[in-house]
Image (tube, rainbow, N blue to C red):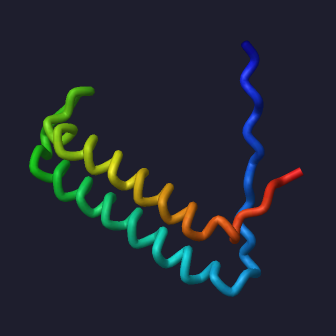
Amino acid sequence: MIMPEKQKRKLNTSHPDCAEYTTKFQAIWDSYYALEDEETAKYPDWRGQDHPANAVLRPAFRKCCAEMKELQQEYSHLFTEEE
């Protein structure tokens, strides 16, 4: 079964709501990376794939992605399909 390709969507940066969307998006992104920095700093000498901070970071990353998706749906009028 062939899956249909998703259309790429581009952010309309000239729309008046774009600044508000970008600010909210950046706040979500920055809060996740602040948590990541905080959690990884607890284990400064850790080397390896199974970092102990992953127990906190995986659920936080899922939450971050869900919040971004919700934000994109809220501001869906800012996105246009690319040709």
**Residue 62 versus residue 30: which sits nearer the camera?**
62
**On-image quarter of the N terminus:** top right
Q: Is residue 43 above or below residue 23?
A: above
Q: Judge left or right: residue 32 versus residue 6.
A: left
Q: Judge left or right: residue 61 versus residue 78.
A: left
Residue at the farthest top position: 1
Give percent across and percent down for residue 35.
23, 59
Q: Is residue 69 above or below residue 17?
A: above
Residue at image location 19% in from the left, 48% down from the top = 40
Residue at image location 18% in from the left, 45% down from the top = 56
Residue at image location 83% in from the left, 54% down from the top = 82
Image-quadrant location for residue 19: bottom right
Give percent across and percent down for residue 17.
63, 82
Q: Judge left or right: residue 62 versus residue 75.
A: left
Residue at image location 76% in from the left, 81% down from the top = 14
Residue at the farthest bottom position: 16
Q: Is residue 1 above or below residue 12?
A: above
Figure label count: 0
**Residue 58 versus residue 5: which sits nearer the camera?**
5
Residue at the farthest right position: 83
